[in-house]
Image (cartoon, rainbow, N blue to C red):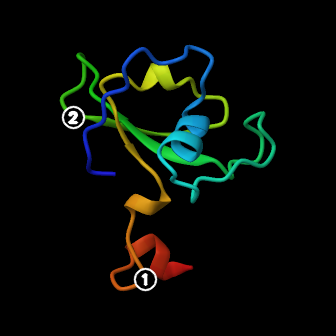
Amino acid sequence: NGQQVTVENPDPRMTLNQYLRDVRGLTGTKLACAIGGCSACSVNVVRVDVNATQPTPYGVNSCIYPLVKCDGTHVTTVEGLGSAEGPHAIQKRF
């Protein structure tokens, strides 16, 4: 969401969803099924692939995505898309 975050000694069992909701307080990313089937927990992860010329964005289910796999990525949650005063184009369509 536009901020660099460093997690010291992350728990290898912690999911990205647990970190976002419980540690960072970003509760816009929901937890519903907890098995990656409903996509209520979807976030955008951008990773720089050494073989690609551009960063690659991925939609991931944060309820099953390990926090430790986020090393070196840019994560955007629903809170990072826009606000009531300045909604993102996706939010305007809803």
The residue indicated by pointer 2 is: 54
The residue indicated by pointer 1 is: 84
Which residue in the rendered view is the most extreme toward the bottom?
85
Residue 71 location in percent, x, y?
Answer: 36, 22
The residue type indicated by label 1 comes to: Ala
Horizontal side, residue 24 vs residue 38: left or right? left
For residue 76, which numbered disc appears in the image? none
The residue type indicated by label 2 comes to: Gln
Which image quadrant: the C terminus? bottom right
- In the image, 65 versus 47, the foreground residue is 65
Please tell me whether mark 2 sits on a helix, a strand or a loop. Answer: loop
Above or below residue 51? Residue 31 is below
Instruction: Residue 10: tell me if it is visible.
Output: yes
Horizontal side, residue 39 vs residue 33: left or right? left
Q: Residue at x 46, y 81 (%)?
A: 92
Q: Residue at x 26, y 34 (%)?
A: 55
Above or below residue 72? Residue 25 is below
